[in-house]
Image (cartoon, rainbow, N blue to C red):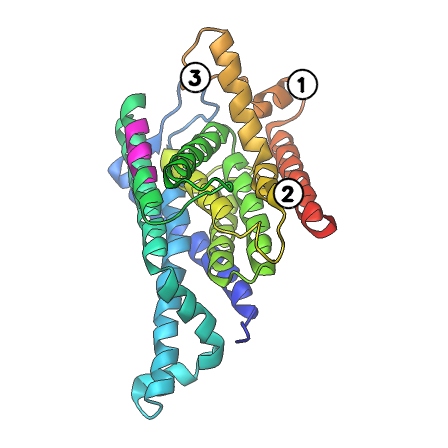
Amino acid sequence: MDFPYNVYGLAVLSSFLVSLSALPLWRRYCVRIGLVDDPGHRKIHAESTPLAGGLTVASGLLLPILAGAFALWLVRHAAETPGSLLGRLGALLPLGAASADPLTYGLGRRFVELGGILLGAVGMLTLGCLDDKYELKPKTKFAGQLLIALLVAATGVRITLFVPSQVFSFLVTVFWILTVINAFNFMDNMNGLCAGLGAVGAAFFALFAALAGQYLVALIAFLTLGALLGFLPHNYPRAKAFLGDSGSHLVGYLLAILAILPHFHTPEQPRRWAVLMPLLVLAVPLLDLAWVVVLRWRMSRPFYVGDTNHLSHRLVRSGYRRETAVLLIWLLAAAAGSLALLWKFLA
């Protein structure tokens, strides 16, 4: 079965356009309901800014998925009843029945898993929105993150690490999801930083999945990439909207899942060290998380209380403009991802 690789381009383009055009609508909605970030302690903006990023990225991800599912249904309908109105409509789509077979087959095999992933995304978005609106207590927010991670792992999204234990796999997966979510949440401290790092990570995971022939995983990654790219012009270098906790939770969750889904190690390519590639792709947010947690622990401060000791803040204190500091961190993340890609080809 030949996969139509132009669908990857369509995925990026559709999610980009949906995200880019949806933000003004979500921005007005957030202003109307008071979902805004007001100036205050450790804030660098001078006026209230809508926390519309999470809703925007979610729109860029979910609406193309729904449209794609409907298109697949039309294509299958065209093959079964070519003379009907829907059949004729499906025949107009640039996706033949034979080309649609890999996606249909994948959806059938991983329906429960994919459903859990999407429900988890909605759950993280909702949890973040509640935190943006009501400033949840750290224990309450962590409990919500844990519950969603447990439910997603229960649907079959798992890390194995070659240990033949379902309990170990389950616990490592939950720990990984929680770690990456909070790493991206911590990195949401300057315009464009979190969204840009998410876009870089999504691009590399999309390449890894596409090269391995994992069409559904690649499509999710390309959709995530497009949705983040559509949001970035509204957030960098000047912010008309922020990601907020809803956006940083969603971005971190999606990158955690995208790091789990690709087959970095396969029977055809038995390279156990390959499972370390996601650590390289996400090295920047993970190392920044480790650094600030250790530093806060040494200073006898709660690790969840924000400060200005992140890499971005240190670059600014060393003389770089905020926009330049963010760009440098993007480039650092791209370099780390490129090393992982090079590792894949050379080893």
The kind of secondary structure element at disc 3 is: loop
Residue 130 visible (yes or no): yes
Q: Quadrant of residue 301?
A: top left
C-alpha gap between disc 3 and disc 2 = 27 Å
Residue 318 circle label: 1
Mark 2 highlights which residue? 337
Q: Position of residue 144 (x, y in %)?
A: 28, 33
Sort mark 3 into few (<14), some (14-19) or many (20+) by Cα contacts within 10 Å.
some
- Earlier in the chain: of badge 1 and badge 3, it is 3
Q: Residue at x 30, y 30 (%)?
A: 131
Q: Is residue 257 above or below residue 139?
A: below
Q: Main secondary structure of the magenta part?
A: helix
Badge 3 vs badge 2, beta-carbon distance below 8 Å: no
- In this rendering, the label closer to the viewer, 1 or 3: 3
C-alpha gap between disc 1 and disc 3 = 24 Å
Where does the magenta region start and end? 142-149
The kind of secondary structure element at disc 2 is: helix
Comparing 232 with 99, the one in front is: 99
